């Protein structure tokens, strides 16, 4: 078997989980012929002046008053000062890097300030601390105590035509709060369709109605416009209790009413929204799965292509200095030290790719660095480091840089695990590389396939190469598509350039592992798989 196993670590520190909802008003308009296309990135301070990116919202086209649907879930520690920075950008291109986008302002605060205010509204500031025009940011905080979610299947029929013969409808669900209506969920747009069927989606109960099935919910149906000035088709008000009545045979039907058309003679509605399924399910947390016996299997893949340089030269990325350091080893230590706490055996399979290996000296894109295909495991992170140092002199660094073979390798084991129909194993592949992928099409296809399996991929880029291709794979804003048009089921890739962390291994580990707990829990919950030892975890409320 080629992936190490993991069971419950000794959990010593507990945190309260807090969900943050972001909205902005009166943003600077940086676009000449249209409005700004804003996105909000959240940065967390780890030490001194170092910030790492925790996550980012979706980008909203042509909008100066955005309400972001994507929320941030943060661990809140009362005893710690948790510094945060919310940076808003106008997205002008398709690159992942935000430094080439227009900066619309930022807010620096602590998580404690947000939690104590419950809803915090502040002016956005430019880098020189001047106000960013009249721009403001509002952050709403809510403690996560209810882990139930509502699974929806929704369609529409006979929606009003908004442009010639068609409409491009999407839905927005709003929760009633003390300060007004808060966006809970936004569906995708179904283009050119008066009888849309939206993809199944889920909304946490806390986001939809605060756990109260009789609390009012507003649903708006809009016709999507590229300009950002979406045209209201109609809306209705309901409750979760009413939504739950619907079935595939007898959907719950809600008339969309457009207030501007109410005075028209013979006006009935602007279409009907059909809720075929609204089912409450219990969501388990990452800790529920870990403490319930789920094992995290950690595999490492190391880039041994020629672009790294001759390992005997101090200019090589594989050169190990007298202190036993290089960027590859630093990345292995940083990520491995965190992951190994969740691994009962502490035995990690480690593979190299892109080198000619003895005795045949053929190029291999998937070879165990201990040269033992039957047992590619290394004992602990110390064993990984030792095997790496021993194999370096025996290799001829070559090329090309192919990721798909090692991804396919781990995918095989993830498939076997999924066939057991139990949440007993999850696989994490760490790829450390110095540059551009050669087999991009095959890698995209491999990642799309892996997105439907209990598997995540972490990519750490070392050196000063152009990593734009890696950023493309880390599809935070939209899901990755394979060359054949197949779309990933979820985002499973997290990429970080090592150079951004200036040797701060704690910050590096926090950044690359930030998304992993949610990836684990959301995957198993979506397949309705409970923790293996259900008696050892408390039932979700």
Image (tube, helix red, strand yellow):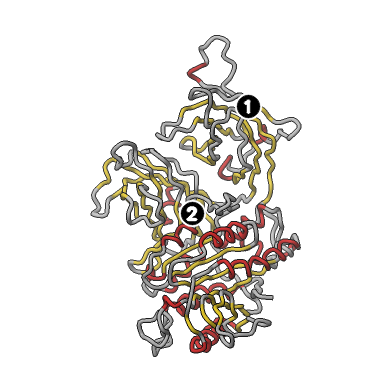
| Figure quadrant of the N terminus | bottom right
Please tell me whether residue 452 is drawn above or below residue 152 in the rendered image: below
Residue 436 at x, y = what percent?
Answer: 44, 66
Residue for point 38% across, 68% down: 465
Secondary structure under the numbered disc 1 in the rendered image: strand
Q: Sequence-wise, which precedes: disc 2 or disc 1?
A: 1
Give the crowd class for mark 2: few <14, some 14-19, many >=20 residues within 10 Å. some
Write down the residue under mark 2.
476
Write down the residue under mark 1.
157
Secondary structure under the numbered disc 2 in the rendered image: loop
Residue 15 at x, y = what percent?
Answer: 54, 62
Residue 148 at x, y = what percent?
Answer: 64, 48
Residue 201, quarter of the rendered image: top right
Residue for point 49% across, 62% down: 77
Please tell me whether residue 174 is drawn above or below residue 118 in the rendered image: above
Q: Which numbered tag is attached to residue 205?
A: none
Using residue 354 as the reference point, say whether residue 247 is left or right of it: right
Which residue is nearer to you in this view: 195 or 344? Answer: 195
Which residue is nearer to you in this view: 303 or 19? Answer: 303
User: From mark 2 to mark 1, how far is it between C-alphas?
Assistant: 32 Å
């Amino acid at each position: 078997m080629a992936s190490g196993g993991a069971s419950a670590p000794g959990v010593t520190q507990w945190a309260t989980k807090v969900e943050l909802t972001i909205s902005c008003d009166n943003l600077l308009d940086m676009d000449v012929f249209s409005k700004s296309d804003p996105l909000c990135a959240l940065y967390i301070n780890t030490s001194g002046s170092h910030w790492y990116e925790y996550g980012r919202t979706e980008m909203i086209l042509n909008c100066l008053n955005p309400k972001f649907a994507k929320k941030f879930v943060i661990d809140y520690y009362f005893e710690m000062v948790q510094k945060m920075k919310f940076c808003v950008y106008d997205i002008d291109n398709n690159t992942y890097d935000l430094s080439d986008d227009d900066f619309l302002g930022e807010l620096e605060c602590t998580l404690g300030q947000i939690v104590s205010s419950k809803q915090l509204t502040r002016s956005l500031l430019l880098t020189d601390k001047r106000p960013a025009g009249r721009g403001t940011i509002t952050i709403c905080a809510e403690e996560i105590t209810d882990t139930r979610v509502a699974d929806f299947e929704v369609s529409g029929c006979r929606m009003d035509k908004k442009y010639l013969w068609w409409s491009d409808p999407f839905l927005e669900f709003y929760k009633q709060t003390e300060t007004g209506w808060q966006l809970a969920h936004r569906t995708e747009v179904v283009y050119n369709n008066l009888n849309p069927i939206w993809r199944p989606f889920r909304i946490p109960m806390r986001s939809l109605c605060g756990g109260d099935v009789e609390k009012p919910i507003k649903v708006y149906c809009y016709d999507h416009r590229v300009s950002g000035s979406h045209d209201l088709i109609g809306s209705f008000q309901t409750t979760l209790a009413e939504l739950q009545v619907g079935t595939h045979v007898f959907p719950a039907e809600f008339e969309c009413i457009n207030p501007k058309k109410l005075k028209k003679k013979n006006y009935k509605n602007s279409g009907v929204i059909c809720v075929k399924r609204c089912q409450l399910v219990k969501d388990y947390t990452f800790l529920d799965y870990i403490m319930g016996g789920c094992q995290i299997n950690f595999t490492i893949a190391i880039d041994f292509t020629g672009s790294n340089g001759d390992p005997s030269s101090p200019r090589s990325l594989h050169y190990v200095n007298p202190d036993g350091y290089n960027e590859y080893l630093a990345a292995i230590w940083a990520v491995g030290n965190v992951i190994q706490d969740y691994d009962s055996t502490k035995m990690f399979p480690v593979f190299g790719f892109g080198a000619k290996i003895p005795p045949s000296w053929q190029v291999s894109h998937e070879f165990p660095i201990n040269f033992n295909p039957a047992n590619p495991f290394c004992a602990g992170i110390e064993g990984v480091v030792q095997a790496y140092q021993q194999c370096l002199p025996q290799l001829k660094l070559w090329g090309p840089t192919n990721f798909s073979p090692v991804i396919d390798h781990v995918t095989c084991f993830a498939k076997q695990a999924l066939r057991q129909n139990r949440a007993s194993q999850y696989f994490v592949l760490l790829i450390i590389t110095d540059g551009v992928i050669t087999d991009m099409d095959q890698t995209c296809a491999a990642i799309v396939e892996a997105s439907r399996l209990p598997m995540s991929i972490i990519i750490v880029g070392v050196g000063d190469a152009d990593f734009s291709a890696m950023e493309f794979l880390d599809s935070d804003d939209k899901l990755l598509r394979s060359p054949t048009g197949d779309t990933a089921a979820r985002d499973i890739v997290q990429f970080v350039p090592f150079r951004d962390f200036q040797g701060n291994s704690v910050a590096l580990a926090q950044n690359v592992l930030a998304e992993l707990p949610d990836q684990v829990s959301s995957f198993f919950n979506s397949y309705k798989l409970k923790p293996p030892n259900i008696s050892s975890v408390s039932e979700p409320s």
